[in-house]
Amino acid sequence: MITSVDFETYYDDECSVTELGVRNYVKHPKFTAYMVSIVREDGFKWVGDPLSLGCPWELINNDEWVSHNKSFDEEVFYEWVRPRLMSSGQLKKLVHPYKWHCTSQLAGYLGAGTSLSKASNVLLGLPMDKSIRDRMKGKIPTDLSPEAMKELEQYAMVDAERCLAIWVRYAPEWPELERRLADYSDSINRQGVCVDYERLEQAKIALRAARQEAEALIPWSPPLSLKKLAGACAEAGIPAPGSTRENSEEFDQWEERYGERFPHIEQVRRFRKSNRLLRIAEAMERRKIHSAVEGDKMPFELKYCGAHTGRWAGAGGVNMHNQPRGDFEGIDFRSMVIPDVNYSKAAREEFIIADYSQIEPRVLNHLCGNKAFLDMVREGYGVYEAHARATMGWKGGSLKDEAPKLYALAKARVLGLGYGCGAAKFRVVARAMAGLDLSMDEATRTVMEFRDSNPAITSYWGRMSAALEQRRNTGKPLIVNLPSGRKLYYRDIKQTSQGVQALIGGEMRKVYGGLIVENVTQAVARDVLGEALLSLSPVLFHMGARVVLHVHDEVVISCPKYQLPHALDRIKQAMTTPPEWLPSDFPLGVEIKTAPRYMK
DNA sequence: GCTACGAGCGCC
DNA sequence: AAAGGGCGCTCGTAGC
């Protein structure tokens, strides 16, 4: 029997998931699960206080439960509700589901967005009203009038009904391998990472000092106000920069001319950066879980299929997918994350960090059938040099050594031009990715040359563009089949005043051929990582190691030091063996290193 | 007082 | 429009 279970819980500014993460939210003294809605496949429905005598826990014992954001409801049930039911004697034996499923993960897999309202909209065609929940902030049911209580119960029931409907209708479309990946994600999240909280404390002191110093040197307030900045520029008799974005061409020119006369800009950046890092540090602190055996750990959230391409998305307050790299004010932020400790075992651990090398260009050239390029990569040439040999007429020796400028251009072309980028944007991309300063003419010429010499890629854009056109204004979705069997969905494709748009991940967004090619490429690279995670899992388990984190094309593993000599080869082997849906000679490359702390 | 949204910026 | 893309979080501002 499928049964949907949805808890309503108290929240306010300081006691919320956003603020504390799921684990410490449920532990908070103010936390209360005041309502649960239960809907069974046979039509049975119940809503009310989960601790009340009438709550039908024994009825749904051993059912298959389904929730939207299962890891949240699990935490509430196992850590707050069930212990109370047991200690009050209301339950004589432990109640639990036979299995617990998640419709947020299912909806993500189906490219429908991960929120219940988007999923309901896209998958059931039923919009939802979330306003009642927003009005519940800081309130518990005793604050409510009987009418308001009734309204809330109805709202909670609708959530559970929609959740059940989505599961019943779409669960068959969710393959076993993807379900394992989703479960695995949840376990990685819950396991968390070890954090060097002492070092973090030192960092916070330095960051507070930097922020304060910067704030004092900025003559306006609030310090990040662009309006105030423009006002101050006007007073100084100089034009205001259109943007303060670092590395933007426009801003660099402005800074060159006026930077000396107007030094506050540098402090604006310093304020922004130190403030941001300080906020992250504080959020990491609030998520701390102390364990005598495992040390101080921080659970986090990598959302399975958080992006419509299927990529995981960092979430939950501390985003492990955008941790700052490198040094700021003497602080290397990534180094706060350290290998697992286990004080009950003597084994010390070390990180192994493994990255796929340029996986997206490799995938793109495979998808469009660019054999010449892939053959050269298989022969051992680097991706950029292979591109230069295949399409830029390079016949010499090592491109990087003999023609560094051409190498940079090849790199910019490979990274920037595969998805339809035009000349103006290419100038920005080439600057950011390869440190190239191109004139508009040079950029235009490069873009044209690239397209001329890469017909396989441009015709791939064309096919996707034609597929879109075929479904425009027909109501029929464009479903792109990926080699893994997974699909990408472009629903409700419409001509609008903004160009062609489609319902992508629950939102209307602009769409065109090159974009779909980019999405597919990203999606296939994601599937490679997914397969790698699953094939790594038993390999690591045998060595007492485990994945603690993954970032799109990078896997961070904590491994007992005495296993390191075997580990590197085995990991590389598992990661570079192509999934069965790719050619067995597909050239996957992995860069692998050991590190005493998270880095790069 | 609140929410919604864009700018800015971090990552791959 | 042959248009690089995918994310999340903080802050400031606009609008209610």
Image (tube, coloured by chain):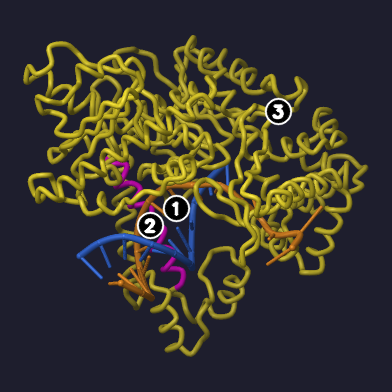
Chain colours: A yellow, B blue, C orange
Residue indicated by mark 2: A274
Q: Residue at x 70, y 49 (%)?
A: A468
From the image, state whether disc 3 or disc 1 is nearer to you. 3
**Residue A332 in view in this figure:** no
Residue indicated by mark 3: A588
The amino acid pointed to by label 2 is Ser
The amino acid pointed to by label 3 is Leu
Percent across and percent down for residue A520 are 66, 40
Q: Residue at x 32, y 42 (%)?
A: A284
Which stretch did the figure color magenta? Answer: A265-286
Which of the labelled discs sits on residue A83, or is there none? none
Label 1: state its secondary structure: strand
**Real-space CA distance between mark 1 and mark 2, rounded to the nearest whole angstrom:** 8 Å
Most frequent secondary structure within the magenta stretch: helix
Please give left or right for residue A161 compared with residue A454 in the image. left
- Decide: few, some or many residues near mark 1? Use Cα within 10 Å; few <14, some 14-19, many ≥20: some
Residue indicated by mark 1: A328
From the image, state whether disc 1 or disc 2 is nearer to you. 2
The reply to whether label 3 and label 1 mark residues of one chain is yes
- Decide: few, some or many residues near mark 3? Use Cα within 10 Å; few <14, some 14-19, many ≥20: some
Residue A285 part of the magenta segment: yes
Sequence order check: which comes first, mark 1 or mark 2?
2
